[in-house]
Image (tube, rainbow, N blue to C red):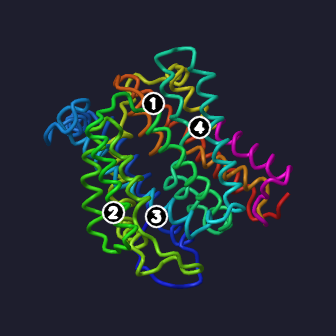
Amino acid sequence: MTSRTPRRGSHSALRDFLHSEAAGGVVLIAAAVLAMIVANLPATAHGYEALLHRTTGPMLSPELGPMSVHLWINDGLMALFFLLVGLEIKREFVDGRLASVERRRLPFIAAAAGMAVPALAFLAVAGGVPALRPGWAIPAATDIAFAIGVMALLGSRVPSALKLLLTTVAIVDDMGAVAIIAVAYTETIHVAALAGAAAVLAGMYGLNRRGVMMLWPYLAAFALLWLLVLMSGIHATIAGVAAAALIPIRPSPAAPDDATSPLHRLEHALHPWVAFAIVPLFGFANAGVSLAGVGAETLGRPLVLGIALGLFLGKQLGIVAAIWGADRLGIARRPAGIGWGQLYGMALLAGIGFTMSLFIGGLAFADPALLGEVKIGVLAGSIASALAGVIVLLAAGRGRPA
């Protein structure tokens, strides 16, 4: 995601997004590798953990306790990530590839199956242990930046239509992940704070209805909304998506980069910060896991195996089966010029769940030992999905559809 000046033209904003998202994905990969190195070097491992858990601020929520570096990243900066996700979702629904019912069918069907089957696979493996059941949603998520970054390494061997399909499926997947976080990982609700958050949203809605196009009132409201949502007991990142839904957009068919549209201006301003700072910082803060004592038996533990198989097997089976069924039944057709081998490779890359999977894992488990297993499972499933996806896409090449 690189900084772009809003402009008019005949191209698609989503195609611009793909080029910039790929660069961000490469940076994220580098940050994850660096975290693994730092967490496993004797000279830096202790300092890495001490830095993340360093207390840096006041207690904003009784459930969270004093704010630490790790909390500021996961609950603070990631709210900006979710704000950007919300902006991208709204843009695609109002002014992009998901603006019509026909275009929504295939991504929705593929994403729904691509979330349900991994969750079922996880429960089949780890559901017998009650303490592990909260992790059912971990393998249901797809990491857009990581997946597009890996696909970008293949260059022209991957047609742009396949990249667009992966991105739209991942965007719909993000919608599902946000809903899961809001519903499944909220335990305690503080009514007064929640009522305050509702009032802020009502105020943003009023600004939108009155045609206010300046960004600063919405950004000020978002900052207050974040604090109130954090205090309410609902995960603070939900404030990002909720606020994005109320940022005004000026629809402009065939030229979605309207310089007068507040949504597009904010999206373009956020892109470089999220892609090259916030998401890599999240990856660095959450991917570091000590491999001391990790052996073959570790991969066989229910939590690790459930996550890894959910990402690697569940994603590919769910997405490919859904696309095949929708195509055969005439509900939604696969993109023209895309073969089944290429679709299979894309489904494999959708099994890269890194950012969102680690995020959900942190919500599902508080035990450091279980969090370590979550990281190993996510890394194993994501790496296997990436390698297999690259191999399949290289083999499929640019061949004609089967």
Most distant residue in the top direction: 129
- Camera-side mark, 2 or 3: 2
**Position above or below: 381 against 300:** below
* Marks 1 and 4, the one that precedes in the sequence: 4
Please name the residue that numbered disc 2 is placed on. 273
Residue 313 on image: x %, y % = 66, 36
Disc 1 marks which amino acid? Val
- Dot 2 crowding, Cα within 10 Å, few <14, some 14–19, many 20+: some
* Marks 2 and 3, the one that precedes in the sequence: 3
Please name the residue that numbered disc 1 is placed on. 374
Q: 392 or 321, which lies in front?
A: 321
The prevailing secondary structure element of the residues shown in magenta is helix
Quarter-of-image position of residue 185: top left
Q: Is residue 280 left or right of residue 154?
A: left
Q: Which residues are magenta?
A: 313-336
Q: Is residue 65 left or right of residue 386?
A: left
Give yes or no for residue 334 being in the magenta stretch. yes
Image quadrant for the C terminus?
A: bottom right
- Camera-side mark, 1 or 2: 2
Please name the residue that numbered disc 4 is placed on. 311
* Marks 1 and 3, the one that precedes in the sequence: 3
SS of the residue under disc 2 = helix
Give yes or no for residue 280 being in the magenta stretch. no
Q: Residue at x 35, y 70 (%)?
A: 269
Q: Is mark 4 in CB contact (under 8 Å) with mark 2?
A: no
SS of the residue under disc 4 = helix
**Position above or below: 341 against 51:** below
